[in-house]
Image (cartoon, rainbow, N blue to C red):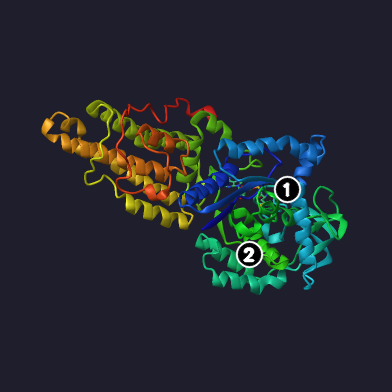
Amino acid sequence: MRFYVTTPIYYVNSTPHIGHAYTTIAADILVRHHRQRGDDTFFLTGVDEHADKVARVAAAQGLSPREYTDGIVGAWQELPHRLNATNDFFIRTSDEGHKRFVQEFLQRIHDNGREDIYQDVYAGWYCVGCEAFKTEDELVDGKCPDHGIEPEWLEERNWFFRLSAYQDALLAIYDERPDFVLPAFRYNEACSFIEGGLRDFSISRATQTWGVPIPWDPDQVAYVWADALVNYLSALSYAPGDDLQRFWPATHLLGKDILRFHCVYWPALLLAAGYEPPRQLFVHGYLNSDQRKISKSLGNVIDPLDLIDVYGADAVRFWCARQVSFGQDGNVTLESFQERYDRELANDLGNLLSRTTAMIARYRDGVLAKSPGAGAIDADALRGAIVERFDRFDITAALEEIWQAVRRLNQHVELNAPWELAKDEAKAAELDAVLYDLADGLCAVAIAVAPYLPETAPRILETLGQSADLSLEHVRAQTAEAAEAIEPAPPLFPRVEEPTAAA
Ligand code: MSP
């Protein structure tokens, strides 16, 4: 199977915070899982440069937009790298290949024979934070509720896209494909927006110069969303390899604030330009702090790189998948981070490996015999549950399944008390079986958890003398081979003393 997954491309008007790391982590967990299944995958992330708010930040620093974005893009490229994200390409909308593709894309709509692009004057309240027009009833006390700023009155002659003509075509897609948008409540939200009637929107800006020139009217540049959405397609046209045919249509991950652009505007633009609509869209919620969205404009950001410095990338990835049910909003605090790190990573998983290897070293001179007992966990059921959860994008539920297996392995130690068995020569076979079942369960767990903990999983396998093959089919009973020279493992997740070091 093919699996092409994307994150939104991030605005570069400031540096990344944990909310941006969130989608990149989720996409990486998904794509690593699909690789484990043997799928042919492509993972795209990148940055959205041609926003008015980017041009404004540049001007405030006395820089041209290009100088500014060239200066800050490094911080955004560092993010996936430090998160251990395995993106195949990192797109910048200022790439020549992207700009050329956007022009071709808009020209295709312009020339599609249905007059889907026409000129008109638009006047309305524009929120620079959202880079979108707002209706009066979307404002609270005259301000954009998401950004806490007053929108600006904008009036200009622009090129418009006839979105209204695509209502039936969009509803037909939603009718045919009940899982086109997940979770289901987001599908319903998108449907009711479409059923409520669609208004054409302007796809160009006359008063800006920072952007992709409209091919048939170079005095105007493309509206930032008409430029940015196209990245999902353009990247395949110039990223190394000839991949457009191979990977389109894509699976898009996005936050709930940009649902309309992705679930309504984007499929319509694609149809108008003669491309297939996306395969699927998954809309996630917000990481909140004190019930408010973590965002630069609200000033409550957590820096993911600081967290990685203190706890490591695996711990940050784990926390993002585990703390908030993927798809829902959730509150996050640094205390919750420390708590999960200590209790679940260091204790549940780290100690399990330390105990298991210490017992193999002590009671069996480091030799693991292939001497299965009844098994400590049901690895086949675990594998099935993981696939089922991942097919619904429920990375949180899949991780919970894995953690139940971790807990069962710990119970297996307590219930069988290997230290008692070791005292009695007559129970040698029983002890071998308990040690094997533990090591075997740990191997299955390591492979299962690899998309979340890509640094830790191979370490577990290596410590147990196993090959580094992470195929999902190895999440099964008796996956562990006999091994020698197993030594007591040092802590997988060493104690971190200062929970506030990352604040
Ligand atoms: N540039 C547009 C996207 C264009 S995609 C063709 C944009 N950029 S953004 O930087 O403002 O947001 C990017 C993504 O980060 C969005 O999906 C947004 O929901 C997500 N998040 C930003 N803050 C967030 C949280 N606090 N929590 C979870 N995700 C959040 O929109």
> Which of 322 and 470 lies nearest the eye of the viewer?
470
Label 1: few (<14), some or many (≥20) within 10 Å? many
Give the label on residue 93, or none: 1
Q: Residue at horizontal 50%, vertical 35%?
A: 334
Residue 218 drawn at (x, y percent): 87, 55
Judge left or right: residue 3 versus residue 354.
Answer: right
Give the label on residue 24, or none: none
Judge left or right: residue 184 versus residue 122.
Answer: left
Going from N to C along the chain, the mark reached first, 2 or 1, is 1
Q: Residue at horizontal 48%, vertical 52%?
A: 38
Residue 336 drawn at (x, y percent): 45, 37
Residue 229 drawn at (x, y percent): 69, 55
Q: Residue 439: name its quadrant.
A: top left
Image quarter of the C terminus? top right
* Vertical arrangement, residue 269 with respect to residue 303, above or below: below
Helix or strand or loop: what does disc 2 sit on?
loop
Disc 2 from disc 1: Cα separation: 21 Å
Judge left or right: residue 152 versus residue 494.
Answer: right
Q: Amino acid at mark 1?
A: Thr
Q: Residue at horizontal 75%, vertical 68%?
A: 162
Residue on which the image places disc 2:
277
> Which of 352 and 489 lies nearest the eye of the viewer?
489
> Which of 214 and 20 lies nearest the eye of the viewer?
214
Q: Is residue 291 visible?
A: no
Q: Are marks 2 and 1 in contact (CB under 8 Å)?
A: no
Q: Is residue 28 visible?
A: yes
